[in-house]
Amino acid sequence: MQIEPTTLTPEATYRLLSGLVVPRPIAWITTLSPSGVLNLAPFSCFTFVSNKPPLLGVNVGRKAGRRKDTGAHIHHRGEYVVHIGNSSQLNAIHESSAEHPEDVSEAELLGLATAPSETVAVPRLADAPVAMECRLSQVIGFGDTGAEFIVGEVTRFHLRDGLVRDGKVETLELDPVCRIGGPNYATLGRIVTLRQMKQTAKAAM
């Protein structure tokens, strides 16, 4: 089977790519509206892009040509919090993707407790195993539909006690969830541990 990309609508291309580029980690993001309402939404085009300084990147699209609330709020305030939810929070993660007016707080609607952040004004989810306070670093536009790759610097990590041992995250304890195609999610399956490859510095050319 072959598909010519130019024959696809943006929606069909999204359905195809979101089913092929899997699994995708989920950034569960809180932002504040200009009037101070706490917004919460999940985004699965998400990764880290630098370790010094620690930078996270998330792709935020548009709806009907307008920035989604998350993107608009990040542009306005320059601050947000990225959470990693676990399997016990899967329903809340999914439900927080529903569209609501800007004056409706998804966190409040779903009964999710919040806590003050340390370095940004945006509250964090109190029960998420991981919360990363972020300040906007840069925004890079891509494509014809107005999608933006938003990069933020992590200014504080909040990790549930017991998640880190000897400097490494205990992934099974984190119990993260990921997005696959459509309204489908997955948890950690079988973990395969291979021998660690020796790292050597390459000589300058």
Image (cartoon, helix red, strand yellow):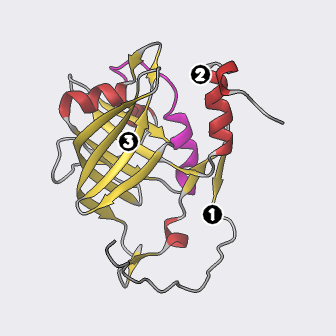
Say which of marks 1 and 2 sits in front. Answer: 2
> Percent position (x, y) of residue 135?
21, 45
Q: Which mark is residue 29?
A: 3
Q: Which mark is residue 188?
A: 1
Bounds of the magenta span?
Answer: 87-104
Name the side, left or right, on which 34 lies relative to 56.
left
Which image quadrant is residue 75 in?
top left
Q: Is residue 73 visible?
A: yes
> Percent position (x, y) of residue 55?
29, 54
Q: Residue furthest right?
A: 1
Q: Residue at x 34, y 79 (%)?
A: 203
Which image quadrant is residue 130 in?
bottom left
Q: Residue at x 33, y 34 (%)?
A: 140
Q: Is residue 154 above or below residue 14?
A: below
Cα–Cα span, label 1 and label 3: 21 Å
Q: Amino acid at mark 2?
A: Pro
Q: Amino acid at mark 3?
A: Ile
| SS label for mark 1 | loop
